[in-house]
Image (cartoon, helix red, strand yellow):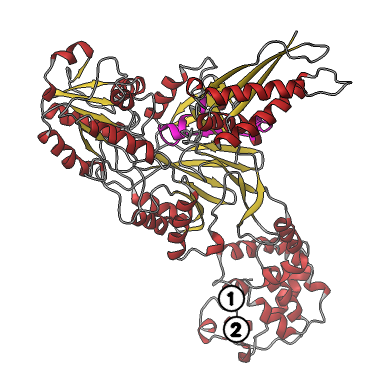
């Protein structure tokens, strides 16, 4: 036994432990006799094993029997049996195996015994033949598909809302509104269509709001009650703006959870959510990182790269690079400024041009901007304090947002800077600043009311400086230009971002977008939050940077994007499907939500373009005979006093239509209405080449 232990001294401690354990087994008398015979065996030098080394025979612990060859060949099987039984982990099962294989040649058995590390691998494969099929069945298992659906923001600027669905878990990013287009008379704003989510409310794990602009928070109070009031996760300033806006609605309180974008992580079902602080024109903006079993998806939100922001932390490019290093499956990136080359201006860079206006203006400075541009409001207030001017806040949303931001510490205002109407009227013009809304030409906003002389105490004076400190939302160009013209006609001087850098956009331009793609290194790229042509331009930038064209999804609102593992593969594959969910316009008009359809809009457009023509007739119920003279009312079509002949001819045609009936005629008001609508419509178009809305009214007596 000493000889065998000395031979195996170079093995691991676990093997030696097994050998010592096996000593107990070899106390059997027959086995001991075989070991005694093996002591006289000396292995031939040709074997090349440890026992053939000269230094081992010179050690005093060697047994004298090593100087002679073994006389009985039966000792070899015994030595072989012991060698194989000395293997780790399966020693008890293998000790009996050599006794049944006494006919195995001695030399191969001895060679196997000198390779203990390979034998467990060779013996385990035939022992468990089911191991390989079990691994294959794991790959064959069906896994849930990750679906991404953008319900708003892929065909317009605004109405931003994105749905992420994995199995039975849904996470929503943003719920914004869209301002009405010029061909939507009477509409206040538009919100996303949530038809797809109505029967999935139990699966919604949370709603994440990336920042406090209305195109991202404006639909929350309308939609959250319909979705079962899920928790809302957002930053502190956005939470304050949400709560203030929700006070106008008589619904259940919002379940708002305030998060820190720099620290917090959320587990929302199978989604592990992290946050990425970004810069925008409002503080506390962040992107969303959704870690799923299929890969990581990044939603940037509205962002730009700004290393010297106002009252905010700069974007962390190192963190973006770290996320990219982990691997990004898909990047959903802001595309609003994708058509513009170069880099976006920093908020601190425009302060110099704003200051030029303050130094040169001799009269009042009237500033129009968004009430949610907290950074711009801070710059105007800081410059007003520097040059000794007092600030009057005009507009309900402006006063509300300034109050919230100041209470939360996002606006720094010295006491006495903000004044009310009474004190404002007492101060000279060169000491005044008016800060209000209306830079997009909104009808009810401050600038429009001032220029139309509809404001209760403000009107334009020669020498006033009017500052449009916001970019133009696509679709509002004509309205804004008309507004500028009206200010010029009344003697004011107008400043806007095309003349001076008085506005720094909140969205990344082309070079910033390229840098973002390089750092994230996504496998799939999805441009979002812009008109379709902007998405296309952004997609071209991504293709220039090496992302394959087939991995770039330029989708439409509601188009489903799917990501999954194909059978027998661990690689996640994405595709832009032909499936679509409902994304109809849901229009808000006063207190009505969704009750204004396209037909109503068509009627409004018709009335706004060609007016309406109302025909009122009274007939006998039984005979259909006309009673009295038809009444005609024209609104927005022709001035009746100046077109008496046209009105008289129309009245005569009404009499003719009402009297034109067969012998068996039974009075049918609907039939008379249809005849009047068609007959009068054709007559008026022939005479005027205009198509007013014809409204026939039939009264039965």
Residue 96, magenta (yes or no): no
The C terminus: image quadrant: top right
Cα distance between the residues tagged 1 and 2: 9 Å
Left or right? Give the position of 533 relative to 310. Answer: right
In the orientation shown, which residue stands out farthest toward the top?
701
Q: Can residue 224 be seen in this view?
A: no
The quadrant of the image that shows the N terminus is: bottom right
Q: Residue furthest right?
A: 664
Q: In which quarter of the image is residue 392?
A: top left
Give the crowd class for mark 1: few <14, some 14-19, many >=20 residues within 10 Å.
some
Q: Nearer the viewer, residue 595 or 557?
A: 595
- Residue at the image point whose x is 40% and y is 57% from the top: 519
Query: Which secondary structure, mark 2?
Result: loop
Q: Nearer the viewer, residue 429 or 141?
A: 429
Residue at left 72%, top 77%? 80
- Residue identified by numbered label 2: 49
**Residue furthest to the bottom:** 46
Mark 1, residue position: 7
Labelled pair 1, 2 in contact (Cβ < 8 Å): yes
What range of the chain is rendered magenta? 197-222
> Where residue 15 appears, x then y in whole percent?
61, 65
Q: Quick check: 619 left or right of 395?
A: right
Q: Residues within 10 Å of mark 2 (few under 14, many from 20)?
A: some
Q: Which of 409 and 421 is in front in this view?
A: 421
Numbered disc 1: secondary structure: helix
Query: Residue 13 location in percent, x, y?
Result: 56, 63
Residue 207 is covered by the magenta coloring: yes
Q: Could you tell which of marks 1 and 2 lies nearer the N-terminus?
A: 1
Residue plotted at (41% across, 47% down): 336
Q: Where 361 sits versus 577, above or below? A: above
Where residue 650 is drawn, which disc sits there?
none
Q: Position of residue 417 (x, y in %)?
A: 18, 20
């Amino acid at each position: 036994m000493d000889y065998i232990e000395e031979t195996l001294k170079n093995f691991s401690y676990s093997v030696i432990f097994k050998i010592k354990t096996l000593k107990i087994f070899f106390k059997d008398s027959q086995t001991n006799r075989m070991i005694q015979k093996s002591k006289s065996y000396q292995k031939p030098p040709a074997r090349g094993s440890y026992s053939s080394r000269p230094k081992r025979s010179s050690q005093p612990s060697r047994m004298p029997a090593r100087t002679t060859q073994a006389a009985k060949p039966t000792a070899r099987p015994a030595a072989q049996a012991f060698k194989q039984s000395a293997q780790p982990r399966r020693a008890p099962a293998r000790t009996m195996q050599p006794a049944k294989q006494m006919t195995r040649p001695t030399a191969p058995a001895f060679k196997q015994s000198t390779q203990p590390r390979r034998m467990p691998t060779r013996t385990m494969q035939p022992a468990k033949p089911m191991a390989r099929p079990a691994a294959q069945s794991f790959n064959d298992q069906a896994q849930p598909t990750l679906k991404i659906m953008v319900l708003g923001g892929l065909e317009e600027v605004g109405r931003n809302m994105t749905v992420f669905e994995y199995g039975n878990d849904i996470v929503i990013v943003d719920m914004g509104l869209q301002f009405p287009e010029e061909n939507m008379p009477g509409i206040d704003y538009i919100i996303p269509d949530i038809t797809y989510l109505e029967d999935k409310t139990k699966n919604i794990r949370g709603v994440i709001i990336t920042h406090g602009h209305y195109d991202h928070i404006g639909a929350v109070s309308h939609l959250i009650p319909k979705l079962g009031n899920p928790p809302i996760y957002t930053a502190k300033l956005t939470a304050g703006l949400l709560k203030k806006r929700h006070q106008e609605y008589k619904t259940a309180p919002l379940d708002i959870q305030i998060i820190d974008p720099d620290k917090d992580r959320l587990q929302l079902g199978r989604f592990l959510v992290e946050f990425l602080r970004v810069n925008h024109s409002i503080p506390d903006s962040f992107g969303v990182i959704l870690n799923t079993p299929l890969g990581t998806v990044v939603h940037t939100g509205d962002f730009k790269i700004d290393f010297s922001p106002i009252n905010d932390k700069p974007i962390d490019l190192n963190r973006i690079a770290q996320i990219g290093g982990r691997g990004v499956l898909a990047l959903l990136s802001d595309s609003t400024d994708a058509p513009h080359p170069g880099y976006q201006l920093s908020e601190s860079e425009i302060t110099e041009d704003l200051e030029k206006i303050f130094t040169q203006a001799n009269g009042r400075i009237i500033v129009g901007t968004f009430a949610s541009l907290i950074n711009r409001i801070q710059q105007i207030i800081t410059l007003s304090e520097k040059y000794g001017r007092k600030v009057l806040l005009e507009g309900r949303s402006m006063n509300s947002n300034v109050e919230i931001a100041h209470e939360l510490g996002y606006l720094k205002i010295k006491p006495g800077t903000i004044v009310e109407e009474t004190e404002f009227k007492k101060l000279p013009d060169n000491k005044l600043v008016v800060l209000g809304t209306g830079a997009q030409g909104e009808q009810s906003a401050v600038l429009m009311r001032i220029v139309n002389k509809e404001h209760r105490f403000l009107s334009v004076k020669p020498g006033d400086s009017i500052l449009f400190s916001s970019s133009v939302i696509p679709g509002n160009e004509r309205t804004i230009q008309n507004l500028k013209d009206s200010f010029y006609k009344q003697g004011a001087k107008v400043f806007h971002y095309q003349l001076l850098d008085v506005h720094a956009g909140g969205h990344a331009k082309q070079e910033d977008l390229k840098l973002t793609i390089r750092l994230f290194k996504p496998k799939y790229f999805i441009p979002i939050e812009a008109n379709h042509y902007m998405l296309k331009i952004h997609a071209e930038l991504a293709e220039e940077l090496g992302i394959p064209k087939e991995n770039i999804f330029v989708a439409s609102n509601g188009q489903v994007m799917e990501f999954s593992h194909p059978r027998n593969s661990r690689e996640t594959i994405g595709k832009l499907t032909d499936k679509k969910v409902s994304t109809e316009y849901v229009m808000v008009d006063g207190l009505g939500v969704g009750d204004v359809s396209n037909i109503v809009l068509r009627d409004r457009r018709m009335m706004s373009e060609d007016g309406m023509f109302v025909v009122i007739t009274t007939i006998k119920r039984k005979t259909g005979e006309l009673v009295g003279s038809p009444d005609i009312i024209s609104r927005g079509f022709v001035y009746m006093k100046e077109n008496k002949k046209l009105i008289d001819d129309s009245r005569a045609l009404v009499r003719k239509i009402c009297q034109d009936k067969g012998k068996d005629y039974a009075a049918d008001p609907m039939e008379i209405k249809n005849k009047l609508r068609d007959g009068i419509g054709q007559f008026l178009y022939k005479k005027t080449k205009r198509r007013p809305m014809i409204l026939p009214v039939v009264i039965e007596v």
